[in-house]
Image (cartoon, helix red, strand yellow):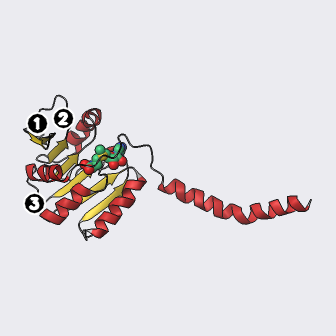
Amino acid sequence: MRTRLLALALTIVLLPGATMALAQAAAQAPTRRPDVIFVPTPEAVVEAMLQVANVTKNDVVYDLGCGDGRIPITAAKKYGARGVCVDIDPQRIEEITANVAKNNVGDRVRVIHGDLFEQDLSGASVITLYLLPSLNVKLMPKLMKECKPGTRIVSQSFDMGDWKPEKEMDVDGRKVYYWTIPKR
Ligand SMILES: C[S@@+](CC[C@H](N)C(=O)[O-])C[C@H]1O[C@@H](n2cnc3c(N)ncnc32)[C@H](O)[C@@H]1O
């Protein structure tokens, strides 16, 4: 009887804390698993991607699936652009947040924990991608629909199927592809 009473007392005391911890974990959890794992773009390729897009301080650079945030952070630090980092993985969000602080670009780089397919892309002037061929093709209609004409798109390693790039280059053994969103 004493054991049962003790168990009941422990449940009453511990339950609110456990419930709160679970609720917090659920709030931080990604809405779903990443479509592709994190593999960082080498710095030389980051530079080439920003240069081919001719990034300046007037740009807003979105990296869709931004990993540790290196592309928007470099765009902000080196070119004075504004950056938007989108990633679905909470571990990446912790890293990006730390990297943004370490590089003192918190006033220019926004971090979004979410699904890249659910973001409003109308504010971007440059979009960078390092995803997969199938994800690029899936994303293309959204780019065409939401991005302003003239928005520059740069993808590392993977093209966009039938949408032929305006520029294509090799950087340290990797392909970099470049398009601009056409007039509607
Ligand atoms: C190959 S890494 C590229 C990282 C970074 N863009 C770079 O070039 O260094 C792909 C990233 O996309 C993220 N990701 C995968 N699916 C996603 C989705 N549906 N929405 C947002 N991010 C996603 C992964 O968590 C990972 O960090």
Q: Tell me how far mark 1 sits from mark 2, CA to CA.
A: 8 Å
Q: Nearer the viewer, residue 103 or 82?
A: 103
Residue depicted at x 10% and y 50%:
53
* Residue ID for mark 2: 159
Residue located at (70% from left, 63% from top): 14
Relative image position of residue 52 (x, y in whole percent): 8, 49
Query: How far apart are the alpha carbons under marks 3 and 2?
Result: 24 Å
Kindly state the secondary structure of the residue where label 2 is placed: loop
Decide: few, some or many residues near mark 1? Use Cα within 10 Å; few <14, some 14-19, many ≥20: some
Amino acid carrying label 3: it is: Thr
Q: Nearer the viewer, residue 123 or 111?
A: 111
Q: Is residue 154 left or right of residue 26?
A: left
Which part of the image, by quadrant, shows the C terminus? top left
Q: Residue at x 64, y 60 (%)?
A: 18
Position of the N terminus, as image quadrant, is bottom right
Q: Is residue 23 above or below residue 162?
A: below
Secondary structure under the numbered disc 1 in the rendered image: loop
Q: Residue tagged by mark 3?
A: 56
Q: Position of residue 63 (x, y in %)?
A: 25, 51
Q: Residue 147: image x %, image y %?
A: 19, 46
- Tell me whether the residue at label 1 lies in contact with that at label 3, contact meaning CB atoms closer than 8 angstroms: no
1 and 2 marks in contact (CB < 8 Å): yes
Q: Which residue is mark 1?
A: 165
Q: Amino acid at mark 1?
A: Pro
Q: Amino acid at mark 2?
A: Asp
Circle 3 sits in a helix, a strand or a loop, which is it? Answer: loop
Residue 12: image tag: none
Does residue 104 appear left or right of residue 153 in this picture?
right
